[in-house]
Image: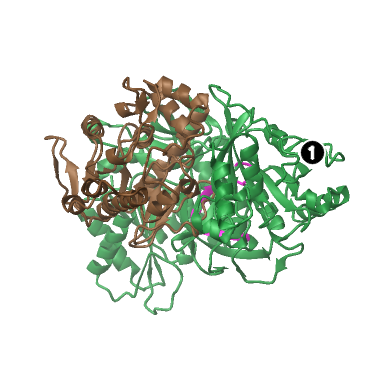
Amino acid sequence: MDHLDQLEQQSVFIFREAFRHFERLCMMWSIGKDSTVLLWLARKAFFGHIPFPLIHIDTSYKLPEMIQYRDRLAMEYRLTMIVGQDEATIKARNTFPDKFKANPAMSEAEQALARKECCSLLKSSALKATLQGTGIRRRLNLTTGVYDIDPDHEPYHGVIGGARSDEEGSRSKERYFSPRDKNNAWDVGDQPPELWNQFKTDFAPGTHVRIHPLLDWTELNIWEYIKRESIPTVSLYYDQGKGTRYRSLGCGPCQKPIESTSKNVDEIIAELKSGRLHNIAERSGRMQDGKHGLEELRREGYM
Amino acid sequence: MTPSAPIADRVEADRDQMNIVIVGHVDHGKSTLVGRLLADTGSLPQGKLEGVRRECERTGKPFEYAFLLDALSDEQDQGITIDTARCFFKSSSRDYIIIDAPGHIEFLKNMISGAARAEAALLMIDAKEGVRENSRRHGYILGMLGIKQVVVCVNKMDLVGYRQDVFDGIEREYREFLAGIGAVSPRNFVPIAALSGENLITTSPNMPWYRGESILALLDGFTKQPPKTAQPLRMPVQAIYKFTSHGDERRIVAGRIESGQVKVGDEVVFSPSNKSAHISTIEGFNTQPRSEITAGWSTGFTLSEEIYITRGEVMSRKSQAPLVGTRFRANLIWLGRKPMAQGRDYKLKLHTCTQPVRIQRLLKVLDASQLDGVLEKDSIGRHDVADVILETRQPVAFDLTTDIEGTGRFVIVDGYDVAGGGIITQAVPDDQDELRSEARLRDFSWVQGSITVEERAKRLGHRPALVMFVGKQNSGKHRYARALERALFDRGTFSYFIDGTNVLMGVDHDLTVDATQAELVRRFGEVAYLLLSAGVILVSTTNAIGLADHSSVQALIGAYASVAVEVDPGGLSTAPCDLRIRGTETEAEVIARIIALLGQKQVLGAP
C-alpha cells in the first residue's frame, strides 16, 4: 500500500461514514482539480455510483471551459447536478467586475474590499441559500441536458467539500467532520473532538456538517492521483503555449495564471517536485484572499 | 548556533509520510519547536518568516516562531494555539505532517483530536517550570491513545544554564510519574532550546554532556507502524450497498479491514449475529480485480450466501472471532461540559457499531494531572479519566485494545457531541454470557440446508421473529396470543402459536420439579430457535418464563428479532419490555401495536 493508497482508503472511509449518517447529503463540485478528485473518490467509495447530488455555485464569472467540462462530465457520469446562483446580485450589477467597470480608478484597497464583498455575495451567500433551500436550485435534466428548476427545497445537513489542510492556513484547522451553525458560521475555537475514526455525525436541527475527505492530501498528491487514475481535468490547468497556466481555479476577473510551461499532468508533477513553486502559495493567483481574507470568508461559510 | 543548510527537496516516487503530534503544557514551547523545525529545514514558503517578523515589528510584539503557525487572527490576538494546525515538513528521509496540539486545558479536546491521528509524539517540558499538570495529563493521554513512540523534549535549557542535573531531575520525576499510572515510558529525553534551535537539527555544543541524537534524527528513527496483516481478521461492517441504478445487481458488504487478511473463497463469520458466508468477490472501482485483500483497505465484498447482516457487525474468521457481550471494562477520558453520570443512557460508537450505553460500575475516577489524583466522585467530570465498566443494551462485538486497536476503542456521544473516548481493557461477563457462548458454538457448527434464511424470508414475505407474551396466570395472554397468531396467519404470514406447556410436557419431560429456571429457559430458547430457523413468526405464552428471562431467550435466538409483551393488569411492573398492556385493551388494538413493532424491527414488509 503506497501513500496514495493510504490517502484513498481514508477518504473512502470518510465518504461512507458521511453517506451513512446524513440523509440529506450533497457534495460541492467547484470543477477544480480537488473537487474532481473528490468526485472520483466518491465513485471509489460507492463502486462506480454517486448516490447524492453535486452542487456547483455558479458566480456567472466562471471561465466557459469550466462550465462545458461540468456539463459534459455530469451527463457522462449521470450525476444529479444542481447549480445555485445569486441571481439578484448579478442582475443588480452589484458584483466586483460591475463596480470596477463603473469606476476603473478604484484604489488597490477599494478593489480588495469590492472583491471580498463580491465573494461574500456570489459565493458564500449563494452557497448558503442553495444549501438551505431558500435560493433557487437548478437541476440538470439528464434527458434534455437543460437545467430545470429543482422542486426540492429541503436543506442539506451534510456537505462534502474538497478543503485540503496544506492549501492555506485556515483550512489546516478543519476537522474531517466540521460543524457549521444555523448561520453557516464556523466556530474555529470550539470544534468537536475527533478521535480515531469516530466523527461528528449528530447535529442539532438547523445546523449542518461539512465533511472533508481530502484534508490530508497535498497539491502534489492530487496531481499524482489524477495521473494514476487518469481523471479528466479542465484544460485551464495546462499551458496552452503562452507560458502560463492556472494553478487554482476561480472566477475569471479575480484570478491570475502563474508562469509555467507545464503542458500535461506529468509536467505539473515534475514542476511541483522540482520545488519551483515551493515558495509561491497555491492560491496566490486568487485575488480575494489577501491578509485574513479567506479566513473571514470561510468563517461565514465559504468552502 | 543556528543550523542552516535547508534540506533539499528530494524527488522520490514514494516517500514515507508520518503524522507526528507535539504536546505539552501551555507555554512550554510547542509552537516554537514546530516553527523552528519548519524554518530550519527549509519547509517554509519564501518570505513567510520575514512577513511574520515585519508584522511583529509593526505591532510591537516580540517575534515568536509560534506566529508562523497561528494563521488565524484570534489566535494571534490571544497568543495561544487553540487548535490542531497541521503543517507539512520534510527531512531527508520522509515527509512529516506535524500536528501542533494546544497545551491550554480549555482545548484538551483539540489536543486529543490531534494526538489521535498521530503515529508518534514529541512531548515538551519547560526546563525552568518542570513537570506541570498538562505534562502529566498529556503523557497519560498519549498512552491511552496508543501512541508508543514518544520523545520528551526538555525545552528552554538555555534558561537553566544548560545544566545536566536539571535535565536529569525532570527525566527522573516524569518517568516515575508515568510508571505510577502504568503508562508507557518514553523512548528518549532530549535537552533542547527550541528558540535558538539547539539539539533540533544538529546537536548543540552548549550541552556536551548530552550524548543522544538531535530531535530530527530521533524523528527519522521512528518506525512506521507495520500494517496489521498478521493479526486476526477484523472488518467492521460499514454498510451493505445495493445500488440498483444502471442495472447494478451487486449486494456489497463494505468496510475497512482493521486487521488481518482475507481472500476469495474464505469462510467468514459476522459477530454478534454469528452468521457465516464465503467471500465470493472483492469489489472495487477502476482497479484491477483482486483475489485477496489486507488490513488498511476500505473495500467491499459480495458473499456466496445471501445473509442478512447489518452495520456494526464485525467480520472475522470462525476460529478467531471477536468477543461478544454487553459489558466491558474501559479506560475513559471525559470531555463533555456535563459530567458523565451513572444511571443515564449515552450513545456508544465502537468501530461501526452504535448502541445505547450506560455506566454499570464506576471503579475509579482520576485527575490525570496530579501525582495521586484519585477523586471521590460518583460521576466523571470534564477532563477526568476513569476506570469504568460500561454496559450496552444489546450485545456488541469488540476486542481488547491491546489485542486489536481498531475494534478495542470507542467514543461516547452525549446529545449531539462526542463527549468522551476510551479503550477496552477487559471483557466483563454478564448474566447471558454462558447462553451466548452456547448459541455461538451452535451457530458456528450449524449444518445449513440448501435454503438460506434470506431465501425463506423472500418466499414467506417476512423474517422470523418471536413474540413472547408474559404475565401472571389468567392475565389474558392466551387470548391475545391466539388472536395474534390468527391475525398474522390471515395476513399470509407463517405464524405459529406455542404454549409453554407444550415444551414442558415434552422436551422438559425428563426434568424433575426442582429443575432450575435457567434450564427451563434454555430449553425453551433452543426450541424457539429451531422454529425461528424454519422461518416462523412464533407467538408464545408461558407462565413459567417471565420478562426477567427475556434477555436469556434473546441470547439463545441471537440475531432473530423478538418482541416482549407483558400483560400487567395491576399496572405495577416497570421492567423493560417492548409493549406493556393492562388486559383491558381490545385484541385488535394490541395486534395493531404488535404489527407496528414487527414493522419497525423489519420483520414484516422487509424482504
Residue A82 x, y percent position in the rendering:
22, 44
> Which span is picked out in magenta?
B388-404
Residue B50 x, y percent position in the rendering:
57, 43
Residue B397 painted magenta? yes
Overall secondary structure of the magenta section: strand
Q: Colour of chain B?
A: green
Shown in brown, the chain is A
Q: Amino acid at mark 1?
A: Ser
Quarter of the image where one finds residue B596: bottom left
User: What's the residue at 54%, 53% (across, down)?
Assistant: B83
Instruction: Answer left or right for B219 relative to A73.
Output: right
Residue B432 at least partly seen: no
Quarter of the image for the C terminus of chain B: give it: top left
User: What's the residue at 16%, 36% (across, down)?
Assistant: A142
Q: Nearer the viewer, residue B513 or B286?
A: B286
Instruction: Answer left or right for B33 relative to B545.
Output: right
Residue indicated by mark 1: B204
